[in-house]
Image: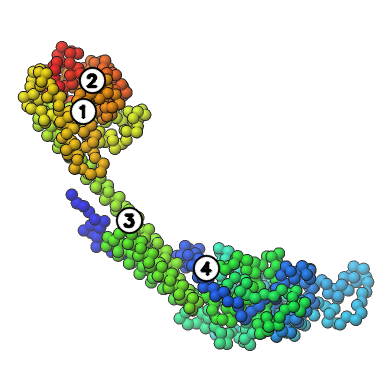
Amino acid sequence: MQLAPALTESSPRRRLGFLLLAVLVAVLVVASGLWKDAPAARLDRALLDGLLVHAASGVQAPDTVVVDIDEVSLAAVGQWPWPRYRLATLIERVAAEHPSAIALDILLPEPDRTSLTDIQQTFKRDFDLDVSFAGVPAGLLDNDGYLAQVMAQHAVIGARYFYFDHATEGAGPVRPGVGFEGRLDRLQLPQAPGVLDNVAPIAARTRTAGFVNIRADDDGQLRRAPLLIAHRGVVHASLALAATMQALGVRSGQIEQDRDGLSLRLGTHRVPIDAAGQARLRFNGGPAQYASIPAVDVLAGRARGQDLRGRIVFIGSSAVGLNDLHRTALDRDFSGVKLQAVLAQNLMDGNAVRVPGWGTGAALLSSVLGALLLAWLFAAGRGLALLAALAALLAAGLLGLAAAVFARTGVYLPTGAALLTLGLLLALCCGVRLVTQHRRAQRWRRQLENARQVTIESMAAVAETRDPETGAHIKRTQHYVRAVARHLQRSGHYTEILTREYIDLLFLSAPLHDIGKVGVPDHILLKPGALTPEELVIMRRHAEYGRQIILSTSGRIEGDNFLQIAGDIAATHHEKWDGSGYPAGLKGQEIPLSGRIMAVADIYDALISRRCYKDPFPHERAKAMMLELRGTTFDPVVLDAFFEIEAEVLQIAARYRDEDDASDGDWDDTLAGLDGRTRPQAT
């Protein structure tokens, strides 16, 4: 018997094949990670989110502050948008505290309809009335002009928004106010065909402006913010970048490239960017870690000067009604103006998240090495528990390394592909091992079934050497009992017993029903004439001998004992439904079902077969004789089932008919005296 391992003599080839398969899986996983919706890419995003949360310093951002037109300020002042003169007043109050830069995160594309000049024009147009205002300085007649004057005076950075779905008309490119040089050829900036700018009086006097475009990833979470966008051949800075450049006194940024990828240098400050001009945000914490002052407190003079002095100030609104809230790893409701503060602080600290250019190569290398290690151990026959422990250890090591590097340098090492590869390879190993074990189990089952059948056939052959009963009789009774058992099962009888396995064992065990005859002396077993009462007692002992022989063999078999049914058949197929049988005088349901089925098959075959002391009975005569014993000798349900498949019974009898007409066989004294040709005391 070949106890084949998972990998047989061809295992070197199989091992090589599995190693190559592992490498292929790793390469495909890494390659798929280049697509943003691939599982590896999604896993990397989730891991980065986790690192952003756990690596957040929790320290208040030192270089930025938001002057927030929040719900309290709106409730106190009323009206939105605010009149431009009120925004101008807010800017003057902020500027008085000498911040390093002021950025207005409010886009004003429409004229202020509350300007005095606008009121004059409205009355003239609608009522043909000339309205004048006495004592008003000329600068306050036009709110837009007044705000433009204040913004220009304090070098406030204005806001603009770029369109990517349609183009806008204009005499020429809008002025960014800052410039960029260096490796611009390495950038693949989004090209915006349209722009929404502040109303003309404000836009004309704004020396520096920055865009406020922000776009979340496909899963709705904001992780990156654009720093650069191209419009009509000119590179424009974001509002946060323009404000930071002003705070640093830098008018031009330098695009650089090294082995880690692209960077934007602002004087001595350097921030990593990708080819699309985006920076990956890194957070000090939630919105509370980015200071904000209610605008109403600044207008009322309640704000502390030290909270504004020397800082980059963003004036904007976090009011929920304006719908400028974004989901991030740290908070689900990060206002747009505070995200400008986050980005500006990243620029000041130079600690925006970097995914190095060699990250894909590192992911491929780690994935391939991990896959090869698992595949090699699997091919070497190591257990799945060891493989799972190793995969978990490798995954923990990769995560620990990624977390340590991120915490120290802000560099994120892509580990999603490697983790996914380990998971897929482990699942593949489990699947292959499961299939291998299943095949091995099937082989063992076939070998066990063969051994079981050989055992039973060998034991039956021993009985045949002592008993002249024909092999055809054994074949017929085997098929009778199986046919009856299947019919009983289909008819809903004894279904809790008649499982498929039980019926198979019943078929295999039937030949052993008279194995106990090996214990009966030859002068009794082979006696051609009638048995004396003493000889009959000895002859009847063959049922108990059969049980003892089988039990002595089955006692050395562990687990599910396939000889149990054989023992029941040998010991009880001479028991009778009314309790008058032998050897134990069992009655009714006390008799095992296997014995009751065997009794019907054995006696029917004895009736229709030729014996040295009788001629064969025709089927109809045998049927009538047996039906007379329904409920006394035979289980009525089993006997009825036997004759309900009468056609199949006749086919079995014909297929396995005796070749030797002078054959002898077992005879139950149940039928003694029913016909003058029967042996009165034959057993």
Give the vertical position of 393 relative to 67 (above or below). Answer: above
**Residue 49, labelled with which disc?**
4
Whole-percent x, y for residue 175 in the image: 68, 81
Say if mark 1 contacts mark 3, CB within 8 Å: no
Q: Is residue 534 left or right of residue 117?
A: left
Between marks 4 and 2, how big is the CA–CA gap? 83 Å
Which label sits in the foreground, 4 or 2? 2
- Counting residues from the start of the chain, the first of labels 1 and 2 encountered is 1
Q: Amino acid at mark 3?
A: Val
Q: CA distance from mark 4 to mark 1?
A: 74 Å
Q: Earlier in the sequence, mark 1 or mark 3?
A: 3
Q: Secondary structure at mark 4?
A: helix
User: Can residue 336 be seen here?
Assistant: yes
- In-image side of 340 versus 356 (left or right): right
> Is disc 1 placed on a helix, strand or loop?
helix
- Furthest toward the top, the residue is 676
Residue tagged 3: 432
Instruction: Estimate how packed mark 4 is, as few (under 14), some (14 to 19) or many (20 or more) residues with alpha carbons within 10 Å.
Output: some
Q: Secondary structure at mark 3?
A: helix
**To which residue does mark 2 refer?**
580
Q: Give SS at disc 2.
A: loop
Quarter of the image with the C terminus in it: top left
Mark positioned earlier in the residue sequence (4 or 3): 4
